Amino acid sequence: MKPSRPPGVTRGVRRPLAIAAAVAVGAAVLVAPAVPAAADDAVVTASITFDDPPVNQGITVRTGDAGRGTWLEVGGLPALATNPSIGNTYIYNDIDDTLINGGTNTVRITVEYYDAAISGGSWDVTYDSVTNPWRALPAVPLTGSNTWRTEEFTVTDARLSNRENGADLRIGTGTSAIAFRSVTVERLVDAPALSLRTPGNIFVTGTPPKVDFTAAPDARVEYRVYDVNNNHVTQGVATNTDGAGTIQIGTLPEGYYRLQATATINGQASLPAETTLAVVAPQPDAANSPFAAAVSHRQLPSGSAPLAVLAGDSYYRPTLTWAGMERTAGVYTYPTAWQQQTIEARDAGLAPMPICAYTNPLYDNDATPHTDAGRAAFADYCAAVLDGYVDLGNPAPAVEVYNEFNAGFGDRGDGPANSLPEYYFPLLQATYEAVKEAHPETLVVGPATSWPDLGWLETLFALGALDYIDVVSVHYPGDPPEAAVANLEAVDALVREYNNGESKPIWVSEWGWSSRTGSVDEHTQASYAARAGVIGLSQGVERNFWYDFNNDGLDPADHESNFGLLRNAADPLGALTPKPSYAAHATMSRLLTGATFEGAQEVADGVTAYEFATAGDDNLLALWSTSGPRTVTIETRVPVTVVEMSGRSRTLTPYLHGVELTLTEDPVYVIGSAGRDDVTDGGQFTLTAAGPTLAGDTIALTLDVDKVGGPRMNLAVTVNERTVPCRSPPARRACRSRSASGTPVCSAPGASWHSSRTTGRRSPG
């Protein structure tokens, strides 16, 4: 699993040195003296400083490929510069082979350069990596500060075996003449290599998480664990026996966690290796869950079906494409990988809702079906898909006809379909009739529109499509989940308008938000996943499919690669390891499966209380705030259980017949006797911190109580399970902490305080 800094992209700027302008003085070829050979696991440093004469410590430099570099004196300091005017735009650096040569190395590359005022100027470094002898690091733009600056890169895949025209790394400056003062390459201690003992690092409550590692035999391996809010949870030292061992974390509460591990040799620590894990409670009734996993355009990855069930999914949504299944007219084949996935899903208890899609070269010139013959062939293929599931003992309760016909998928090839509802309708009709003839019990689901495209849907329904749909399906990726309320209401209204006043079941076969760079981050994706499920149930959506179950790729900037609840099977963090959204989805599913929606009540701007009756006869309130942190009071005479978005729970005891919660964008679930009408805006208690506090320091906290003429109150503040009592005199502020140097009245010396996205106030009298 990956170090926390990805290979080839980590860099940092160090001290600027104010220097005057540059003066050209000559040219240079520099050769490093011989140095003693280094052990394979030794921490070594090679450098060259462009003094006059140069100081060579294990690096040989040559300028090229055309002409020679230029000596510059910048404010009295010698430097070596490229000379684009004669075709020299590179400086090659060759590290002594006795120091580093071959293998896989973690190295820090430090380059000192003059940040001249050159419009559009920049420089970059390529290095000889394990997979690419010319691997490029991010370019460094000049800012015109006219100072010496230092740029630092850390990479974990350096090979450095002289494959860059006889050198190990190359500095390039393009058309700019840029001066350099020094180059340093340090081989660091290699991070531990982490490997999974449990599929996906998904653990059931009560099972202590364990992760295997390998490291240098003499390395001290330490680990730290952080929760979904980046709070430090625990740490320890793992036993390293001859270069291998197991990190045994100990029992953790439900939630999402990051594990970081470092190796230390002779006092020098490696970069941290990192993986993620989740602890989830058992799903009491996953088979009847209204939540499901969408894996459109592909199959579930091998080994992932049990993880979908642990997340509380009852269905999965795969695709066996028409072109992949019918390669000879009328002959249907079922790929081995599809068969294996179907059997794995069957054994895990997942029911399929396959998609029938898209085109076939044998019909309509591989365009979206638009002739009677093409539609008939598509319908026969869809019935054959269902035959395959029956043959493998996992019959499909439902089948979805096509996918996002209203978007680009309905306009494939050179046919006339153009994503129009007039072409989807006859395709739906033919498929419905073929499916019902072969599998009358199977629900036909459609039209799987991209967004609730109301105009498109109205045209389709006016054509009579609702006579050939058992379940109406829509997709909802994009806006925050709350915007779906109006859209889902509008879809239901359209169905009633064109179905004689009667509704039909509505399924969202794709809820999803990509966590790609520049979109929502992984934490927000988790928040959206939980909120979408609550909103879906509140709008009568009978099945809610999350798109996608796992990331499709590894590029963090690619939109389609980052929808998953789990990471990709090839992710450096570990195969199918969880994202925060997995724990949020699992928590939501566990709490809401079997629950009945009772109603919603707006509490304040951006705060709505969603009330459910659970299978255990408790009330469950789902609460969050979209308008910033907001305190609410819940009237109750009995304790309530508060479950956070990722699964961690705690009990709050009421004070004066109520408990208070500070809500954020992350949903919380309150289980007890309180209903939606018992939630009011505002609260009596306000807890504030003077500012961020490091672990081990005294925390400065202020607890204010809003009361007039009230009695004396005995209060307590708990931080990371450390409780400190304090007193509120009658009709005055409850208590105020002193400075860390004074005598604390309401503080927790030595505790570790971190701001939390959701906090609860427990105020016993």
Image: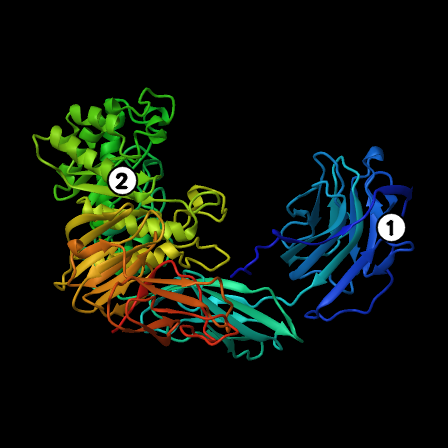
Measured as percent of width and height from the top left, residue 484 is found at: 27, 40
Residue 264 vs residue 324, the one in the foreground? 264
Whether residue 595 is visible to the viewer of this picture, yes or no, is no
Residue type for callout 2: Ala
Residue type for callout 1: Pro
Quadrant (top left, top right, bottom left, bottom right) of the C terminus: bottom left
Residue 704 vs residue 496, the one in the foreground? 704
Residue 364 vs residue 33, the one in the foreground? 33
Q: Within 10 angstroms of label 2, few (less than 14), some, or many (20 or more) residues?
A: many
Local SS, label 1 = strand
Residue 78 got which mark?
1
Residue at left offset 80%, top offset 39%? 177
The residue at which mark 2 appears reads as 484
Left or right side of 159 for 552: left
Residue lying at the far top in this picture: please name it.
416
Measured as percent of width and height from the top left, residue 98 is found at: 78, 65
Tell me the distance, in whole angstroms, between the alpha carbons under discs 1 and 2: 64 Å
Say which label, 1 or 2, has the lower sequence index: 1
Measured as percent of width and height from the top left, residue 227 is found at: 42, 64
Label 1 close to label 2 by CB (< 8 Å): no
Residue 633 vs residue 533, the one in the foreground? 633
Residue at left offset 8%, top offset 35%? 502
The image quarter containing residue 124 is: top right
Left or right side of 407 for 519: right
Measured as percent of width and height from the top left, residue 255 is found at: 35, 64
Whether residue 690 is visible to the viewer of this picture, yes or no, is yes
The image quarter containing residue 39 is: bottom right
Q: Is residue 535 above or below residue 34?
A: above
